[in-house]
Amino acid sequence: MDPMDAIKATYFQECDELLASLEEGLLALEAGEGDSDTINAVFRAVHSVKGGAGAFGFDRMVEFAHVFETALDAMRAGKLDPEPEVVKLMLRATDVLVDHVQAAKGEGAVDEGRAAAMADDLAALTSSEAPKPAASEAAAATTDEWGFAPLKFDFGDEASAASEAKWRLVMRPAPQMYAKGHDAALFLRELARLGDAQVSLDASALPDLESLQPETPYLAWTVELPASVEEAAIRDVFDFVGEDCPIELTLEGGEAPAAPSAEAPAADMQALLQAVQDESSPETSATVPPAAAEKGSADKGAPKGAQGATIRVDLERVDRLIDLVGELVINQAMLAQRVAESELACSSSVAIGLDELEQLTREIQDSVMAIRAQPVKSVFQRMPRLVREIAGATGKQVRLVMEGEGTEVDKTVIERLSDPITHMLRNAIDHGLETPEERAAAGKPEEGAVRLAALHRSGRIVIEVSDDGKGINRPRVRDIAVEKGLIAADANLTDDEIDNLIFLPGFSTASSVSNISGRGVGMDVVKRSIQALGGRISIASQPGKGSVFTLSLPLTLAVLDGMVISASGQTLVAPLTAIVETLRPKPEDVRALGPAGAVLAVRGAHVPLIDVGVALGLRHAPIDPDHGVVLLVESEGGGRSALVADEIQGQRQVVIKSLEANYQRVDGIAAATILGDGRVALILDVEAVVEKRLNERHAPLAKAS
Amino acid sequence: MTDVENSNETLELISFRIAEQEFCLDIMAVREIRGWTAATPLPHSPSYVRGVINLRGAVLPILDLKARLGLGVSEPSARSVIIVVHIGARLVGLLVDGVSEILAAERATIQPTPNVGCDTVSRFVRGIIAQDGRMTSWIALDDILPAEEEAEAA
């Protein structure tokens, strides 16, 4: 990789983190939980994004970030209150900034109109006219001169009606400041941006070339700034360096103005800020004391980011490690099988050693999988934006509550979570929540609440999306299902069964098709993609009170606990999660139903019998169930089926191997694995086997297609 | 992709016999040749798909080339081999009765496939190589995997 590209990649990685913390901070502010630390963190996030963008020459991003930063700076200085309206605007500004970053990555484009409007709105927060052109100039200056090109400073040709009073700043960078990668030129540039800066260089300490120590800084600068510049603003420039760049700041001549302000149209801006402050409620105006902003040093943001020492590792390396450990597990199993075949005593040293090896292998596998585990946060943090956009499009008021963002799950699963969650949230807002008027009429708060939660439950990850909306309209759902021929008109369905009708293909309750959801491809698509991952989805709904969608997924798509069974001489693996119980049926419990069907009586209930060999086309006639074993499996709708196999070989953890990598999807098969004897065994897609059987009662035998 | 290549280029081809006919593959597409091991059959698959085997941890589909070319079903024996080939990003094993030799042929000498009014031939034979009074058919691999029937269902 080109070194520049590598740096850029790191920058984008950081951007993602910064933008995430930006949004997180703003959301905290919106919830009224933020303090000055939060505001500082938010400011620093935008500032850092801008800094990098300047270095890479992303002009438009710099321009926008600068306007954003200006508004945040005002908030940091206590001149702009973090009231809900302002924070909401900033959240939307974050979305635009995200777009900018995406565009810089070469993914997607920025809606220029939206960005410009947003920049104007942001600018309006601090001033009605000033920041916009100033921002462009500043941005132009930054991008024109980045790198080591000589800096140009305006030495005051058009010195504004300068008062006698001046700030006199002496900065004397310490060696460690350069060692940390800071550049004095950047500070000078920042200072110049604050107002008319008169910079003079003090090179008196510079020794002869012979005695020059290349890593010792000899230069000092004296900067004179108009007294109208706020002291805090000047000190803020050195926020990030602290002790590394000692400064002496003195006010010379005249008096410091009582109401310091930032830039040229000072009076207007001050008045506007005052107006903004006056509008805000008095009790919140005290939340951000200017003093707090003044001392925002780099370590203030630390508590949030402090997660112990971490390293960045290329994902490919981790994936490779996981693959290798997978091989190790297979090899270990092969070895175990050989040893078992050689009929050594269980107490032999080989067998004991092998047992230890097995434990170690498991442990290594768990640890390696833990490396790739990630908190679901990376998916969750994209959702507030989505919710804002859907809420905006539907005219509904929505509050998104997220819980369990720290829940960890394998990266392979994380990547597949985003689409189903997106879909479920859309549904919850578009179909679940009522309009503010309807809510008010129903005696509910106008703002609807949508909760997105993640948790671990019995070795799986569970994602819940719940809303406090109107719940599922069961009579309507039923009518539609009848109308579309999905169920018989006289079908007798329980409430649960009716709720689950919405997962049927081609079902859509929205009477008008909106562009948010309601194209009739909604929930059945979600269900399919979840099932493809070995997951389940279910819904619980209470009319008038809301609905809860629950989806559960395996923690990893790399390994699976399975029951090894055989059918027609083939070894198959059934995912343990699908199996409720296994039993050997008694002949009297098997009852024929219809010409070819049969059911099994299990504790009073009758479940359909499905011969695995027949379902997979391995044999033509089902075996006598009482000669085989029955795996009682539960499918999505809560219905049970009995899978008939020849025998059960055991239970073990298997490494999932994709069939699609070299071949293609096979109906009824979820994936493949490699067993101890080195042969490939297929992993059953229980849901598909059951569904296929139920949907097409007279499923033809597998045939060459 | 073949059209833009240098016509003076010498191709190395690996040849084998299927049902008394000579076929060959571009050696560049071949990753390895290994002995026959019993494959795990795949349900709901075309008859020429023998199943899958374990190739050092990867799941490798095995196609019976004889059946794919419509020349009958192979009876795998100890002499049968699996030619592991790249098809795009995929690795696929082709079951053949045994490989014969390595041929060298200049690209310019390869004759276009004569039209014998057979779909299988036009689909799977890329050209004809005539050498020493023998005719060898150069196999095109692009279409050899079964079409993805479930593309729209997934």
Image (cartoon, coloured by chain):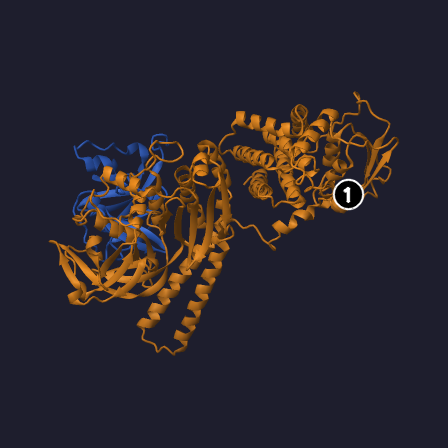
Chain colours: A orange, B blue
Q: Eyeballing the image, is A284 above or below A625?
A: above
Furthest-right residue in this view: A253
Label 1, on which residue? A245
Q: Is residue A363 left or right of residue A588?
A: right
Give me the chain letter of mark 1: A
Q: Eyeballing the image, is A692 above or below A447?
A: below
Furthest-top residue in this view: A158
* Image spot of residue B92 (x, y percent): 31, 47
Residue located 34% across and 37% down the image: B10
Question: Which residue occupies the foreground of this view, A460 or B33?
Answer: A460
**The N terminus of chain A, quarter of image:** top right
Question: Which residue occupies the foreground of this view, A662 or A185?
Answer: A185
Q: Eyeballing the image, is A349 above or below A695?
A: below
**The C terminus of chain A, quarter of image:** top left
Few, some or many residues within 10 Å of mark 1 (<14, 14–19, 20+) = many
* Image spot of residue A392 (x, y percent): 48, 33
Where on the picture, by quarter, is residue B54?
bottom left
Q: Taking the image as drawn, is residue A502 in sight?
A: yes
Q: Is residue A414 left or right of residue B44?
A: right
Question: Which residue occupies the foreground of this view, A314 or A605?
Answer: A605
